[in-house]
Image: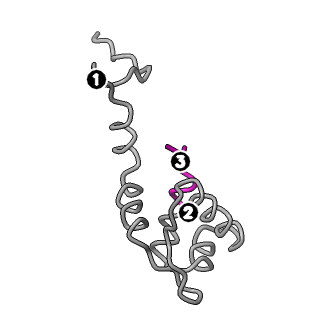
Amino acid sequence: MSTLNLHHLRLFRAVARDGTLTGAARGLNISQSAVSTQIKALEASLGQNLFERAGRALILTEAGRIALAHAAHPGHSARHRCRTPAGPADTGNVPARRV
């Protein structure tokens, strides 16, 4: 499985919400070409097209709809990936001490 980062997920959600690269870029205060490059990188890392291009508009593919559902709750998916047969993986968190 490819490594995803929260930056890619944030950009992906913005493009899915807005429906255009330009609108998403404006909302994120970054260039349209930066958004386009990162979305292409995300699609390449997943091996799936997340959007269908219809002129300047972007429409989520089936894979994009599935990815958006997971991107809406990235922490939830990460917790599930950290589980082992013996239970949750050690996250390094130390329980609070009672005083």
Which segment did they paint magenta?
1-10
**Circle 3 — which element?**
loop
Residue 85 shows which numbered tag? 1
The x and y percentages for residue 77 are 36, 44
Residue 17 location (% of width, % of height): 45, 73
Q: Quadrant of the C terminus?
A: top left
Q: Is residue 79 magenta?
A: no
**Relative to 91, is 1 above or below?**
below
Residue located 38% across and 70% down the image: 62
Q: Are marks 2 and 1 in contact (CB under 8 Å)?
A: no
Kind of residue indicated by mark 1:
Pro
SS assignment at label 1: loop
Location of residue 95 with respect to 64 vertically, above or below: above
Which one is in front in this view, the residue at disc 2 or the one at disc 1? Answer: 1
Residue 36 coordinates in the image, percent (x, y)? 65, 70
Q: Nearer the viewer, residue 54 or 30?
A: 54
Outermost residue to the bottom: 55
Mark 3 = which residue?
A: 4
Q: Three-letter amino acid code at disc 2?
A: Leu
Q: Is residue 87 left or right of residue 89?
A: left
Location of residue 82 with respect to 30 vertically, above or below? above
Q: Which mark is residue 11?
A: 2
Of badges 2 and 3, nearer the viewer stands 3
Give the crowd class for mark 2: few <14, some 14-19, many >=20 residues within 10 Å: many
Looking at the image, which residue is at 38% across and 36% down?
81
Whole-number angstrom distance, CA of label 1 to CA of label 3: 23 Å
Badge 2 element:
helix
Tell which circle, 1 or 3, labels the residue nearer the N-terminal end.
3
Q: Residue at x 53, y 45 (%)?
A: 2
Left or right: where does residue 67 sit relative to residue 4?
left
Distance from label 2 to label 3 (Cα)?
12 Å
